[in-house]
Image (cartoon, rainbow, N blue to C red):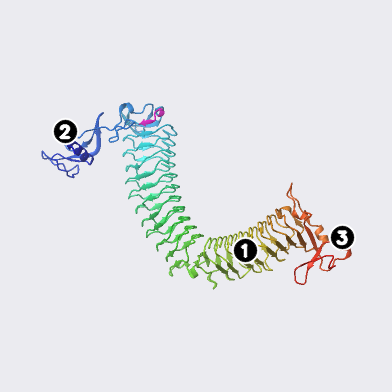
Amino acid sequence: MSKKLILSLLALLGLCACNGTDVSQSSTSINSSSEHDHIYGTTYEYDENYHWLEVLCDCEGAEIKEQHQFNTYGVCEICHYVKEDKLAKGLVFELNEDKKSYYVKDAGTSTQEVYVNIPSTYNNLPVTKIGDNAFRLKSGLEYIFIPDTITYIGEEAFYGCTMANIILPDTLSSVGNSAFKGCSSLKITELPSSLKEVGESMFDGCDGITSIKIHEGIKVINRFAFNNCANLEKVELPSGLEKILASAFFNCGKLNDIEIPQSVSEIGVNAFYNCSLKSITLGDNLKEIADGVFTNNYDLTSVTFGKGLTSIGKTAFKNCSKLTSISLPDSLESIGESAFEGCALLTNIHIGASLKTIGASAFSGCTSIETIEVSSDNQNYSGANGCLIDKQTKTIINGFAKSTIPNNGEVTSIGDSAFLNIVGLEAVTISSNITKVGNSAFKGCSSLKTLTIESGETSFGTNTFESCSSLDNVSLPSGLKISNAMFKNCSSLTNLTINCGVTSIGSGAFYQCTKLDNVTIPSSVTSIDNGAFSYCKGLKKIDIHANIESLPTQMLESCESLETMILSASIKSIPYNSLVSCSKIKEVYFLGDYASWSAVEIGDGPYSEKNPLNSSSVTIYCYSENKPTADQLNTYKHYWHYGSDGNIEKWTEGNL
């Protein structure tokens, strides 16, 4: 290797020895002897042709000059000297308030070129700032050079520009909000340590950034700083970073490599929402994890919490579907709603003594958890029978595959979504101690086959057993109010007993229970809501003794196998839309006499929407306990009653 090349390399390291010996000395330890080690700084000096590191000793001729290495745009890649003829023309400058320096007010006509090299001086005064909106929405740019005299870049200064390359000087101390927002081709790879913060929305939507290093000295990454950087994969954070604010890396869908420093004490709402992080370690300085911080990080498999953590916010880890285990610190006091919802591979949870608050659905959809462990010293929660139970309200917050519901009075209610989508839960008994079951409490429990409801006094929320696809036999006790969509999409339900004393059937209660073929509604029912049995495509017979005056809208819509109906004598109206697409009805047995049937309004809809009961292919039978008289037969010919075996018996010419 030549001596010149060796000296050049040493110069880049900031050291070179006159006597050929490499040493490491600071700029303050210069030997006064005639032969000593030259000391070089880190700042380049230059002329039109050469650059060299500044010499910090008094020796003449110690400079090691090298020729400039100019890029396509006339900027030296080493020292950032710009050729005079490549400096931007047409920029608009204005004096700063100090009257001793200028700022770039507007791009002017400079953007007629594909590059802009901003000069370091104007009218023999330094250019120190780039103003707000100076280059906003300037298209056609490929390259921007910013000299080391610039200390501030204004808000939206380069908003929506098309340039791919920009050099940020080490003198830059502050950048305004949205300075580079929407610069979709920008490929910046590092931020200078002279900055103290990454500005709000600074690189929002900069899809060209794939990897970025944030140097030491930066303490805060502000809101939306890298929001929607769709191709960002790796971020190197400084060890002294203190805050990552709301949505800082929101929707950076490819971001998978980042190490959060131990120094971080705040991570804002949705900071890493919809990223692809794989492993996270959080330091002891972080006391709270805000809402939605790691939501939809589908590849996240491991999380290590700091010892000082006290709070995990709503949906913080929702849908982290590859997360397998977590060890919650003993310092933890609260877990927000849906914090771990949808973490389908999570297998074990330990809850310490300090936990005071767990939000609704905190562990809903954690289908791989079989039981939960709760410290016996916890005053607020227990893990009795494998359920997570709020001791104060006596409510099951979450249940799991091997849970059983306590029947000793320890539990009086089951919370919303408590067993949502739990696979492996095969049998449920809701004892008379349970007064309330929440919305969607057992929704999607696809293994549930056996259900026992002991008391009709228990109140059920909507969609309670929706999509329990293995449930085949249900008996509903007297006094029960069947809630909206209570058994919706229970596709295996074949045997349904609605006992006398049940008072109401909610909207869509048995929607799309396709294997139901025979249903009897007792006279105790006084209310049936819309669509109660719609799309029960296997239903062949329905016996409606309910004390109602009109069939509800869409009550039996698309019950396409329905052939036989028994209708209560209280019925006064049958709207066309209550029986839409029930084209196979053959027989209707009315529990009233002919005079009452004659008064029933059988509605037709507009155009082709005809009520099937007006079809000539349907026979209506009116009730007559005794043999019809001749006068009755002269008036109407079709009558029926219940035979001695309790089944329908028609009065026909053969038995009259």
Few, some or many residues within 10 Å of mark 1 (<14, 14–19, 20+): many
Q: Which residue is mark 3?
A: 635
For the residues carrying marks 3 and 2, which lies nearer the camera in this image?
3
Q: CA distance from mark 3 to mark 1?
A: 43 Å
Q: Which residue is mark 2?
A: 61
Instruction: Provide the secondary structure element on which disc 2 rests.
Output: loop
- The C terminus sits in image quarter: bottom right
- Image location of residue 646, percent across then percent down: 75, 70
Residue 317 visible from this viewpoint: yes
Q: Which residue is mark 1?
A: 493
Residue 509 visible from this viewpoint: no
Q: CA distance from mark 2 to mark 1?
A: 96 Å
- The N terminus sits in image quarter: top left
Instruction: Provide the secondary structure element on which disc 1 rests.
Output: loop
Q: Is residue 634 above or below residue 152?
A: below
- Image location of residue 593, percent across then percent down: 81, 63
- Image location of residue 8, percent across then percent down: 21, 37
- Decide: marks 3, 1 in contact (CB < 8 A)? no
- The amino acid sitting under disc 3 is Thr
Question: Sequence order check: which comes first, mark 2 or mark 1?
Answer: 2
- Decide: marks 2, 1 in contact (CB < 8 A)? no
Residue at the farthest front position: 654
Residues in magenta?
A: 111-117
- The amino acid sitting under disc 1 is Leu
